[in-house]
Image (cartoon, rainbow, N blue to C red):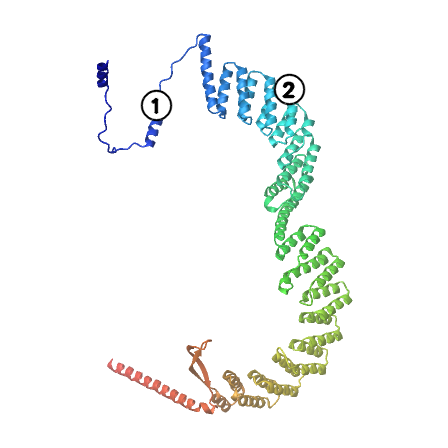
Amino acid sequence: IMASTAAGKQRIPKVAKVKNKAPAEVQITAEQLLREAKERELELLPPPPKQKITDAEELNDYKLKKRKGFEDNIRKNRTVISNWIKYAQWEESLKEVQRARSIYERALDVDHRNITLWLKYAEMEMKNRQVNHARNIWDRAITILPRVNQFWYKYTYMEEMLGNIAGCRQVFERWMEWEPEEQAWHSYINFELRYKEVDKSRTLVMVHPEVKNWIKYAHFEEKHGYIARARKVFERAIEFFGEEHISESLSVAFARFEEKQKEFERVRVIYKYALDRIPKQQAQELFKNYTVFEKRFGDRRGIEDVIVSKRRFQYEEEVKASPHNYDAWFDYLRLVESDTDADTVREVYERAIANIPPIQEKRHWRRYIYLWINYALYEELEVKDPERTRQVYQACLELIPHKKFTFAKIWLLYGQFEIRQKNLQNARRGLGTAIGKCPKNKLFKGYIELELQLREFDRCRKLYEKYLEFSPENCTTWIKFAELEAILGDTDRARAIFELAIGQPRLDMPEVLWKSYIDFEIEQEEYDNTRGLYKRLLQRTQHVKVWISYGQFELSIDSDDRIQRCRQIYEEANKSMQSCEEKEERLMLLESWRDFEDEFGSFANKERVQKLLPEKVKKRRKITAEDGSDAGWEEYYDYIFPEDAANQPNLKLLAMAKIWKKQQQHEDEEEQEEEEEEEGQQE
């Protein structure tokens, strides 16, 4: 035995020892091993051989084997519902309904909220015509999961297919208690309609009051011939949504319904009602349908109404977005004045004038005040309601803060309106109040113009007196006052007014006033008074235009010594202006004197004046910038008068320069003539 054992040990091969323990050049990773294993799984394997069960014992073995496999899978993971369903379906295929039912019940114990499990369970019962079992399952399902609509749909479908209409209705009513989605309600309604239960369909409570559901409800009534009921549904829908949440699609549907019924006036009312309340950007379809309707059934006026309505809608949006945009209000009012009645126009005017400028500054009120003016003119000219026009003017005048600023235009328009109404007392009272509250030049001028037209000269005198008390420096007022007295033939009063005027310490245009006074005296042919005025004026100013005007005056008088008097004035003016710093004025005077002598003087006088004219000299001077730095040089022209003693050397130098220049020109001309003669001889 020991020998045989030793021999056996020798026959067993020994494990080969690894001599080279270095790492292989190509390493095999775990990822590669998994990839190869996956690829081998995909290799086609030959199908298993077919088995035929020939007796009951083999069948029982097969069943036992399959059940054991299913139970093992369930035991491994109870939560995988697909294993339960496969198991139950296999039992069902063997007509083992009781076993399948048991499996489904066991599965429901594991996950009773699984929708697929309930559906498969109920379908199995229905396939095997186990109606009561199926009802039981559906009842349990809708009790546990009432929000799963699929259970309700299948339950009601089963009852209807079985002909159990009462039971189906009962299921629907149970379902509706949960207030499901819209489609569920439509399914219930369609169910009732299939069995001609129109009244029951109508009495269903609308849990989802959306626009499309109201429209469907109305179409339902229309389809069954209940036109009055359909109209009532649309009216209830309009009331339900109210003016703030009115729907475009609902209005279009309502209008189309009425159009089918040939109720064209009702259609217009519906469209206009909707357009007045729906924002413009949400009413494009509404405008489109309204325009198409008017083109089909309306006249030209109706189409214009559509366009006007659309424009009104645009203006409404503009004024809502910016209430103080007065230009938008003007456009809106122009539109409504041309198309709508007086009450509507008044309403828009009242809305417009309610937007008072928030800041009490006149520049912010300039556009706003024209709203009131247009309002008053509309009432007077279009509506022809003088009492309301008067109320508009009075309300406007009460609104304006006259202590800060006023608008003379409003006061004058009000006065003119009262005169047109032959109410002179009110006009005078209004303008008098204006002058008392907020005196302005324009107000005085307008009031005086009014009294002049009425030929109330005493009132004009009083107004001029108040005007001059308010603004004594206004030369135009003094002149107009004096002209009024002159027109009335009261020369002494006119002269007294001019004397008062020129005696004022401050005047805005004194030269105009003096000229008017002088012209007045000339018109009265009071030449001595005119000379006295010129002398008084020259005591105040030595302006060259005054001297020239004085000389022209003397020249214009028809007398023998007029030329001598005019020349004497020019002599005095030249002497007086020798010390004047403005050399251009002296030059202007001498040029005027030269023109005079050219026309009326002798040769000696002309030569004398010509010698007095200055020489024009170009000079240079430094320019200093605003910061005091040197900015360079500039050229300018200066005038050197012969009468100035200090400029005599300069004049001599200029004279010598001129003589030298003439000599040079003469020599150049002689040389040119000699060259021409030489060329001629050579030829």
Q: Earlier in the sequence, mark 2 or mark 1?
A: 1
- Asked which quadrant contains residue 552, the reply is bottom right
Foreground tag (2 vs 1): 1
Residue 638 appears left or right of 504: left
The residue closer to the viewer here, 111 or 388, is: 111
The residue closer to the viewer here, 243 or 249, is: 243
Q: Quadrant of the C terminus?
A: bottom left
Where residue 37 sits: x, y (%)? 34, 27
Whether residue 543 is visible to the viewer of this picture, yes or no, is: yes
Q: Residues within 10 Å of mark 2 (few under 14, many from 20)?
A: few
* The disc label shown at residue 43, or none: 1
- Asked which quadrant contains residue 51, the reply is top left
Which residue is identified by label 2?
A: 164
Whether residue 225 is visible to the viewer of this picture, yes or no, is: no
Residue extending furthest toward the front: 2
**SS for callout 2:** loop
Placement of 284 over or under 671, stated as above or below: above
Residue 369 appears left or right of 9: right
